[in-house]
Amino acid sequence: MQQVSEHAFIETKYLGCNVGAIVTDQGPVLIDTPALPQDALDLKAHVKKLTDRRISRIIYTHEHFDHVIGSAYLVRGGIVAHQAAVREMEYLKTNLAAEINHFFPDLYRQYQAVFDSVEIISPQITFVRAMTLHAGDITLELTHIGGHSPASIMVYVKEDKVLFCGDIVDVGMPFVTPYSRFDEWIAALVRIESMEVAEIVPGHGEVCGKENVKATRVYFETVRDRVRDLVKAGAGKEQVVKNVDVRDALPVPFSEAVLPQVRSTVAMMYDEMSEE
């Protein structure tokens, strides 16, 4: 595992999301989980090298399957998440295979036996706005930020000034879903830019700094402003999606591969404005 600070470690190589481990004198606290059982066992082995204490709890940064389905292989109790994660976790218990097959059909075919049999462990401890966990010598500040998903939170390791952001910050194109809210997302990015942080751990990709946060915010703000201009001019959704060009504001180099995500973002931004 990569050491980020005195107490924080991460692994970026597993299938799915980044996984963090905060070493405390009450036992390690994991941030999110690997998607495959062999990766979960590998994580366990690495954590044992960091401390002889058992894993004390897991924190889900949000409710999406690539962040939560490994918990059954790690620890079954003491799982913490935002209250909004509970309903989605119940949904995943009967619809996980369909969800993975919809978004990642090749992945589902490769690991079908795993995904068809995995047990989803719902959080036992939830909160609404904020929660502070005092884990012996370490203070973890959990804050609901929404944006990427209804249950998205960030986890701040106060003593180390390390921030785990889940998918509110990704190194690469930000991945939007049908439940993303851009007003919340932009506000969360602004908040992170104002915080005192030494290292930022994204949901996917390598550890980054505030420059990556700013790039994502500028991208979303550019999409928002250009969509708004076309809407004010009377353009409909199809015309907006076709004509909004944000290549100058992309947080990654332009390629044909990013176009579907850009178009999805533009379409969702239009829908969100239509609700105002």
Image (spheres, rainbow, N blue to C red):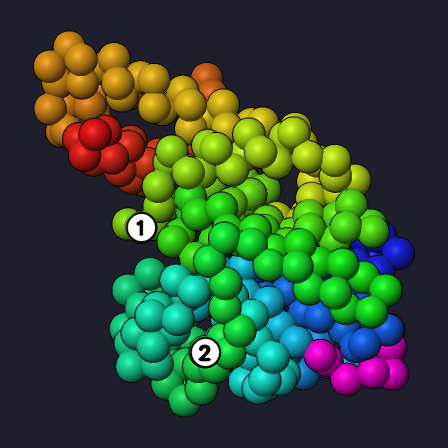
Number of marks drawn: 2
Q: Are marks 1 and 2 in contact (CB under 8 Å)?
A: no
Name the residue: 13% across, 29% down: 238
On the image, the x and y values in percent for residue 274 come to 17, 30
Name the foreground residue: 251 vs 147.
147
Q: Residues within 10 Å of mark 1 (few under 14, many from 20)?
A: few
Q: Nearer the viewer, mark 1 or mark 2?
A: 2
**Magenta residue check for 53:** yes
Q: Label 2 belongs to which residue? A: 122
Would residue 95 be found to the left or right of residue 39 on screen?
Answer: left
Q: Which mark is residue 170?
A: none
**Magenta residue check for 11:** no
Q: Magenta stretch: give its range.
A: 50-56
Element under disc 2:
loop
Amino acid under label 1? Tyr
Q: Is residue 182 above or below residue 27?
A: above
Name the foreground residue: 25 vs 226.
25
Element under disc 1:
loop
Q: Is residue 157 above or below residue 115?
A: above
Amino acid under label 2? Ser
Name the residue: 38% across, 33% down: 183
Position of the N terminus by quadrant: bottom right
Q: Is residue 148 above or below residue 219?
A: below
On the image, the x and y values in percent for residue 250 come to 47, 26
Q: Which mark is residue 179?
A: 1
Would residue 269 be found to the left or right of residue 247 on screen?
Answer: left
